[in-house]
Image (cartoon, grey):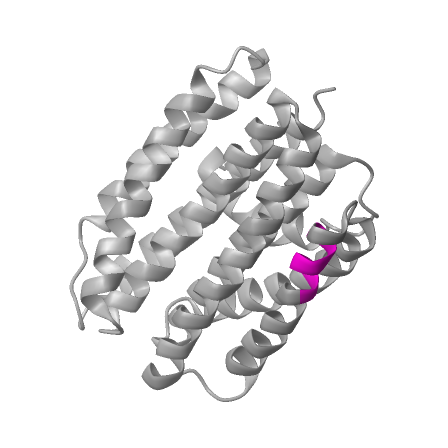
Amino acid sequence: MKRRHVLLASVAAGLSGIGLAQVVNLNDAINKAGRQRMLSQRMAKGYMALGQGVLPSDAERALATSMALFDRQLVELKAFAPTPDIKATYQQLEAKWSEYKGVLVGAKPDAKGAASVMSISNAVLQLANQGTVQLEKASNKPVGKLVNIAGRQRMLSQRIASHYLAASWNVGAANAKAEMLKAQDEFLLAHDTLAKAPENTERIAGELVLAQQQFVFFQAALQNLQVGHASQARMSDVFQTSERILQVMDNITNLYSKIV
């Protein structure tokens, strides 16, 4: 089996097994806090896919595993929060997360609900990012910044896909397309930063090359955006490729988080 297929098959299993242990140090906290950003966008992607009948089994699994993992990690991060400001951020995130869950599972996915999902997912993302940045500052180490940047790449992979699927559904299409293009540019810029990091091990460098290769496939799929009437095949390509990039970037983030 080709590695790209192995990566896709391992995403659900890999992410479902994450977050079972308590936060062990600041690098681990930055990793998990950053993963919350990704999950906010992966849940939106799953909702958009379900509403359009795109890979329904995969989409439902992505949504369910992401919600469960977000719940577990939020508990861990609240318990770990090393300062009152960080604890306050996670209290705010908890409230917004409750609102997000209600929209995600309150009714069968439809275009009206999709607009709410995209809006609330942005609010959840902003708070999750706030917590990640606060934890990085608390770390005050170069590797903490690398964990943050690599972790953010996971989020961008899902944000790109969720906005592609939103535009395909004609849900805020103009804004969705603009955000999709912006996120692609941000991914490439951050990748260049990571590739030049002096802390990179041989293994990390190899994984970064793989991520770059996967992003080429991703960009090829994204070029086929058709607002309001995308084909199932094209939307499926975007969904699947974003899952493969997510797994590679999660591996890279985990490797950075283990650097002392």
Residue displayed at 70% across by 52% down: 85
Q: Which portion, as a residue range, is magenta? A: 86-91
Q: Residue furthest bottom?
A: 107
Depicted 7 relative to depicted 167: above or below:
above
Q: In the image, what residue occupies the spot 37% across and 60% down?
A: 162
Residue 68 makes an appearance in the image: no
Judged left or right of residue 97, residue 27 is right
Q: Is residue 248 left or right of residue 239?
A: right
Question: Quick one: which residue is furthest to the front in this view?
Answer: 84
Residue closest to the eye, 78 or 20: 78
Asked if residue 78 lies left or right of residue 121, the reply is right
Residue ID at (46%, 87%): 108
Please state, as top left, top right, bottom left or bottom right, where the C terminus lies in the image. Answer: top right
Q: Position of residue 77 (x, y in %)?
A: 74, 52
Does residue 102 belong to the magenta stretch? no
In the rendering, at what x and y percent does residue 117 appear? 43, 74
Q: Position of residue 112 (x, y in %)?
A: 34, 85
Q: Is residue 85 above or below residue 176?
A: above
Establish if 4 lies above or below 11: above
Nearer to me, 54 or 85? 85
Residue 209 x, y percent position in the rendering: 42, 22
Residue 71, quarter of picture: bottom right
Q: Is residue 89 within the magenta segment? A: yes
Q: Taken as a whole, is the magenta stretch helix, strand or loop?
A: helix
Give the side of residue 68 with respect to residue 173, left or right: right
Q: Is residue 34 above or below residue 173?
A: above
Q: Is residue 88 visible?
A: yes
**Residue plotted at (47% across, 59% down):** 41
Residue 173 versus residue 137: which sits nearer the camera?
137
Q: Quadrant of residue 67?
A: bottom right
